[in-house]
Amino acid sequence: MESYRNPVLVAAVVVPPAVCALLIPFRDNFDNANLALLLVVAIVAIAAFGVRPAGILAAVSSAVWFDFFLTPPYNSFEIRHRDDIETTILLVVIGAAVTEIAIWGRRQQARASRHRGYLDGVITTSQAVAAGGSTDELIDQVRAELIAVLGIDGAKFVASGKLSGAPVLNADGTVTRGGRVLRVERDGLPTNAEIELAVQHAGEVRGRFLLTAAARIARPDLEQRLVAVALADQVGAALTTHQTLHP
């Protein structure tokens, strides 16, 4: 968004007065409400980028220049008619509403894209397990997926026993420490200790991923944490199969 944020902000300042200036020759022949509709088009075009300050700025700028250029007395910020006052206020309200809708739509689109990425990661891992390839390669693949999905700094696989007192990412997606559930969405994953994620299959633990989030605060939501659990379970299934074939 940063790549187009500044140009959109500039457009929010420049476009409304330019549109109003172009409408000056028609202000005596058209109702002000119809002229305002053309300004609404400009506001919607700017708000569609999902940059909240730009959308609000475009709405306020449109209202101000609509008052100045298109409502009598012209070239003045005075408004004498009630209809013009209502139209000016509506321009601001519509601009703010459209901006929020655009932001919501972009967030939904980004969320859908992330979900697709999570699903692709699980499917790719499942295919690797089904293909019966190298377990080391699968573990490396899952390590990379875990780092990406959880937004953490690192992950490593160990076959040793459980670490005493370490935070745990459980099968239900909760993160606990000493039996206490941590509020990951609010406080983030623990940064002062490695987080255990069991690698298991059919109720039997085959190892653990130790997750590190020391350099930055990571706040994966429940869905992301469940994806991480599913990825670890894929490794558990692969290790079980490997042990069955190569006892």
Image: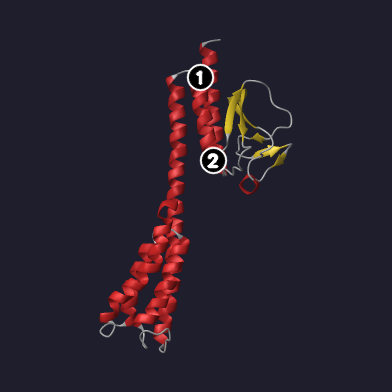
Crowding at label 1, few (<14), some or many (≥20) Cα neighbours within 10 Å?
A: some
Dot 2 or dot 1, earlier in sequence: 1
Q: Position of residue 71 (x, y in %)?
A: 36, 84
**Tag 2: residue type?**
Gln
Residue 10, x across and y down, in percent: 40, 63
**Which amino acid does the dot numbered 1 rest on?**
Thr
Q: Residues within 10 Å of mark 2 (few under 14, many from 20)?
A: many
Q: Tell me the quarter of the image containing the C terminus.
A: top right
Image color mode: secondary structure
Decide which of 244, 149 is in the foreground and name it.
Answer: 149
Q: Which residue is mark 2?
A: 224
Q: CA distance from mark 2 to mark 1?
A: 23 Å
Residue 70 appears in which quarter of the rendering? bottom left
- Depth order, front residue of 38/77: 77
* Residue 147 can be seen, yes or no: yes
Is 221 left or right of 60, judged from the image as shown? right
